[in-house]
Image (tube, helix red, strand yellow):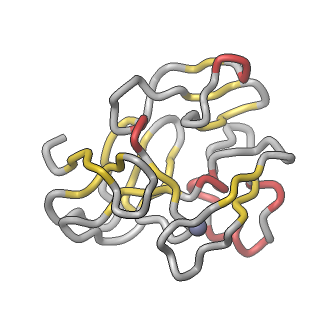
Amino acid sequence: MEMLIVKQTEYGAGKGVYASEIVRDGADLFIFSEQVVSWAKATHRAIQTGKNCWLEPAKESYGHYLNHSCSPTCGFQLPNKIVALREIKAGEEITIDYSTIVHTSKWEMECCCPSLQCRKLVRSFPKMPAEFQEKYKEFNSWEKR
Ligand SMILES: [Zn+2]
C-alpha cells in the first residue's frame, strides 16, 4: 500500500512502518500475515490468535516491521488486519499495543516506547486491567473470546 513506508525509528527500535499520507480513522492498513505457525516456530514478531496458533509475518513485510506502542495508532482485527484506531497524520508511526496480541500469561516485555503513557513493562492481555481489556476488546487477537 503506497500510503505506508518502512524507515528507521528515531528511538532505537530498528525499523518501523510509517504513514506517508493522512490515514482516516478506522481505515484498513494492511494484512498482517496469512501464515499460522505453532509457538515453537513463532518469532517475537508473531501475533497470537490461539493456544498454539501464531500469525507469523513474512520477512520484510509491514507486519515484520510493526512496532509496539503503549499509545498505539492502530490495532489488530481478526482474522489478520491492521486498522487505524484514530486519524493518523503523514509521518506518524503505525503501531499496535502488544498487550492486545499476546495471551500467554507469563509473557512480558520491557518497554521504552516514546509514549507519555509508557507502561515500562508490557504484559499479556489476560494480565491487563479490566478497563484495558474493555477498551481493546475489538482488537484482541484471541480467536475464541
Ligand atoms: Zn511503552
Q: Nearer the viewer, residue 8 or 125?
A: 8
> Which residue lies most toward the bottom here?
116
Q: Residue at point 63% right, 47% down?
A: 101
Residue 35 x, y percent position in the rendering: 50, 19
Q: Is residue 132 left or right of residue 114?
A: right
Q: Residue at point 49% right, 56% down?
A: 96
Q: Residue at point 50% right, 47% down?
A: 77
Q: Quadrant of ligand 1?
A: bottom right
Q: Residue at point 28% right, 66% down?
A: 92
Q: Nearer the viewer, residue 42 or 78?
A: 42
Residue 3 x, y percent position in the rendering: 16, 51
In the picture shown, does residue 76 fall above or below 120?
above
Residue 129 x, y percent position in the rendering: 80, 70
Q: Nearer the viewer, residue 4 or 28?
A: 4
Q: Is residue 63 left or right of residue 112?
A: left
Q: Nearer the viewer, residue 131 or 107?
A: 107
Quadrant in which residue 31 is drawn? top left
